Amino acid sequence: MDYRINLPEQEMPKQWYNVLPDLNPPLAPPLDPVTHQPLGPEKLQAIFPMAVIEQEMSSQRWIEIPEPVWDIYRLFRPTPLVRAHRLEAALGTKAKIYYKNESLSPAGSHKPNTAIAQAYYNKQEGVQRLTTETGAGQWGTALSFACKMFGLECTVYMVRCSYEQKPYRGILIRSYGAEVFPSPTDKTNAGRAVLAENPNSGGSLGLAISEAVEDAATHDNTKYSLGSVLNHVLLHQTITGLEVQKQLALAGEKPDVLVGCVGGGSNFGGLVLPFVPEKMHGKGPRFVAVEPKACPTLTKGEFRYDYGDMAKMTPLLKMHTLGSGYFPPPIHAGGLRYHGDAPIVSHLVDQGMVEPRSYYQNDVFEAAKLFLQTEGFLPAPETSHAIKAAIDVARESDPGTVIVFLYSGHGLLDLGAYDAYNQGNLKDDTFSECDLQNALATCPKINI
Amino acid sequence: MDYRINLPEQEMPKQWYNVLPDLNPPLAPPLDPVTHQPLGPEKLQAIFPMAVIEQEMSSQRWIEIPEPVWDIYRLFRPTPLVRAHRLEAALGTKAKIYYKNESLSPAGSHKPNTAIAQAYYNKQEGVQRLTTETGAGQWGTALSFACKMFGLECTVYMVRCSYEQKPYRGILIRSYGAEVFPSPTDKTNAGRAVLAENPNSGGSLGLAISEAVEDAATHDNTKYSLGSVLNHVLLHQTITGLEVQKQLALAGEKPDVLVGCVGGGSNFGGLVLPFVPEKMHGKGPRFVAVEPKACPTLTKGEFRYDYGDMAKMTPLLKMHTLGSGYFPPPIHAGGLRYHGDAPIVSHLVDQGMVEPRSYYQNDVFEAAKLFLQTEGFLPAPETSHAIKAAIDVARESDPGTVIVFLYSGHGLLDLGAYDAYNQGNLKDDTFSECDLQNALATCPKINI
């Protein structure tokens, strides 16, 4: 058996899978942030191109991947599905562990799958500049790359604590030709308000989103791009799960458990959504979603309407949330520091289709080092959450169980975090009932 | 046509190609550093295992890749050969540019091809610890990874200026379980001698080699491992050129020009040596070797016997050299800061089979950014020398010319260098006739 299952280029999917028409009950609609009424597509036009808005609400099960997007995917796709033989041997497990290696993209993560699509649709509609936020920097890197491919300008608001923890990210984003600012900045009302209260604020994803949305909404020919959470983002990411289906078929395997880390939910969603139709019929693999104990949205949060950002500018989304005002501790998995979760993923959790788990970061880095020292590759801290869970699932499972996890990104720009772990300097931040009640106090009261 | 030509795993070569029996005239022998007489294999046993010594002098054309080595190669090999369509389009060239992507290995470069083999042979002979030097850190990372695969300890002496320029390298090396020290250290006589003269010395590869060799020679169960220069290293690297031959055949192409950067010569040698037999019959592709103007071994050095290290502990090798006492300026392509070159590569240059070129680092980074912004991937500064030359060759060539360069490593741990370039802070160090005469004054006078 080959270690790496490579799909030929001509086998790369030509369509994304849209789960919306297959959800039953259907997804709760987004609400207007002011009137609290279901939101019409026209309300989103200030910040998104029409093609993206249509995908956000589409009832079409399969959506064509535009040829120029597919053509850029070819730079790195299909990505290999890899059997982690050496990790299995080190664990002494008889389970089979596979990982879908999305770290081989130019930006080093799964994020280009949607960045390329979003940049393309914006370019088609005459947009000249995209704004966005980034946590650990994976998304900012991906959008910078994608914008360069289509000749768009790009402005990135990077959560300040990550900006400082991971200085190489900013250099890489600039090298792609984009601009990047540590958030909170003094460039937006949202940023200035936080700085006035706390000039040393480390920032949060929710705040960086507010800054990027405000920038887009207040400038001509400028739109906003989000790297996770929304339906169209998960749609674009389904290319990973669709490839996994083909690759497992090539290997003659049926998956028993799918594992992904969850920040906003895009890599997890991309992996599992193509398996939802089977699941609706009571078949198909288990879905395991993994998050940090410092930001335990799915395991501790409430399923209710909340804002996507701190400044309450975005539509209200029904999702698992810790409260849009919550500032998570500065754990190194910056991409998992988000108060909410994708409505689609939250819906599946609510329907009992997903098993959420949470871990402390020291346990996660221990798993990461075991992976590094057996499989050779250095995982991102976010990805390492999935590795930790895959290891635990393997330990709990019967011989022959087929476990697939999404290897969402490499950790080469996160080595500061490994240094802290190697030196025993990582804190195991947690989150209490009391934190939860305080955080949720900022949520709007909506009964739908 | 596919962007990436993937070779199936079962097509990965099972043997390395040894060029020695095909060289005519034969390679000049290594000499004893004290007696200046040809060196018997027994003299090398203090620092190398027998299997490696045999390969260093073998007259066998094909050498079997041991199954445990091949098995670890499978973690990342065969590597793809990629058509750089977007770079071609940006250049407006009608030449075809391919790159062999060795950056996808766990260590991020071609270096594991020999590190894995060397770790294996040492393990077989009961060695417990390997010592080595590293410049930019690619080699130290690779050997740390390889040692972990076979349960060996590993000690890395890293050239101090690179250790400081690229702090993430040390963290990665330690995360693989190895120890790493900035060289010069106070752990060896060679290091202490340099520190006594200049406590702030930035170090050199030649000095770090002295330290690593001294460590191995003075400790039990410890051997030394070199990442370039020697015949057995180039032998192990031929897997890249052998894969390229198969991949070009799959694509229906015949190569016209092969391009590689040269520090010690291992990535260049690995790419071109399998094409030497054709070349001996006046056929086959052009070989273009690329180096920095700050350390222009092939373009300005003399072809003569010299030591491989600063402390004159290694055998004398006949090679292009700037003098083993030469300290190159601290350019960011740390892997190209070596005073000498592989005897095999030097021999081919002397025979007129190789066209050497040299570049300033600002021109090299300009090429790197063009590659980044078209193909998406961030190249190492060393690799960027090959990119610059491939671009120039494309510009000089007829339509349809097939150019293949070796993409030896990624630059994700070299982002400090990109920052310096982006900010206009890179110096274009050069090398004068006068520098050359001073540097060569340290060479021994040998008439063979």
Image (spheres, coloured by chain):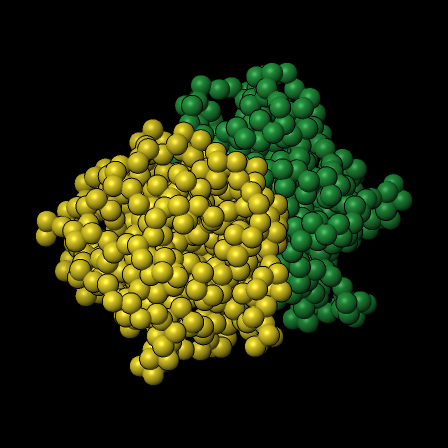
Chain colours: A green, B yellow
In the rendered image, is residue A283 in sight?
A: yes
> Which residue sits at x=79%, y=46%?
A428
Is B156 drawn above or below residue B70 in the view shown?
below
Residue, far left: B282
Residue, far bottom: B434
Image quadrant in which the C terminus of chain B is located: bottom left
Front residue of this view, candidates A64 and B2 = B2
| Left-right relation of A210 to A126 | right
Residue B439 placed where, x, y %? 38, 76
Front residue of this view, candidates B316 and A90 = B316
Residue A14 placed where, x, y %? 38, 36
Residue A245 placed where, x, y %? 47, 26
In the rendered image, is residue B105 in sight?
A: no
> Which residue sits at x=17%, y=60%?
B351
> Which residue sits at x=63%, y=30%?
A390
Is A391 drawn above or below residue B118 in the view shown?
above
Image quadrant in which the N terminus of chain B is located: top left
The image quadrant that residue B386 belongs to is bottom left
Residue B394 placed where, x, y %? 23, 61
All told, the count of numbered labels is 0
Front residue of this view, candidates B422 and A34 = B422
| Left-right relation of A37 to B208 | right
Residue, far right: A434
> Which residue sits at x=87%, y=41%?
A433
